Amino acid sequence: MYMEKQFRIREPVSLIARIDRAYRAADGAIVLVELKSRWKNRAYASDVIQLSAQKMALEGQTGQQVAAHAFVTVQKPKKAGEQRAHLVELMASSEVVALYRRRQDVVAGLVVPRYADSLRACKDCAFRAACDRPKGWPRSNSTKQGTHPVQSLVGGHPGHKGIG
């Protein structure tokens, strides 16, 4: 139905989202598919956030119903044909808006950012060397299981900390 198409909205927040793929399901809803090329064969919280923003933008611009779930299809770099689709549940629009506003407040210095829930989230951070996070905090290297992506978001500087 859609391939590499951009959608935008101005209300309730300004969003521009580029959709990799969107297909119409048998029930008439549009199902989003995000294509990723990476070594780890999994969906991340950032994928859910990205797809949730895409859902808001597509629904807001077109008025069409988008499914509450989507797929993240992962292919390892330079490995043609080896793909795996991961089913993800999308965030509610109110959660996307809250996340958007929280990020704005962090960037503006109105609220203090927090560290990521996991040291693992810091592993590939471009700002790792400049981060003021105490060494070894927290003691566990694993992320919280069953935590909603908004609560475990690890992006968003300044301070090299998460924004949740």
Image (cartoon, grey):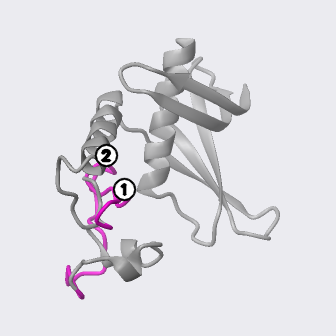
Numbered badge on residue 103: 2
**What is the CA distance from the residue labelled 2 to the residue labelled 1?**
7 Å
Q: Main secondary structure of the magenta part?
A: loop
Question: Relative to 11, is 20 above or below?
Answer: below
10 Å crowding of disc 2: few (<14), some (14-19), many (20+): many
Question: Relative to 26, is 109 above or below?
Answer: below
Percent position of residue 37, x then y: 67, 61
Residue lying at the far left of the rendered structure = 111
Question: Relative to 88, is 140 above or below?
Answer: below
Question: Relative to 94, is 12 above or below?
Answer: above
Comparing 84 with 66, the one in front is: 66
Callout 2 touching callout 1 (CB < 8 Å): yes
Amino acid type of disc 1? Answer: Gly
Numbered badge on residue 156: 1
Which of the 4 image quadrants contains residue 158? bottom left
- Labels 2 and 1: the sequence-earlier one: 2
Q: Secondary structure at mark 1?
A: loop
Residue lying at the far top of the rendered structure = 63
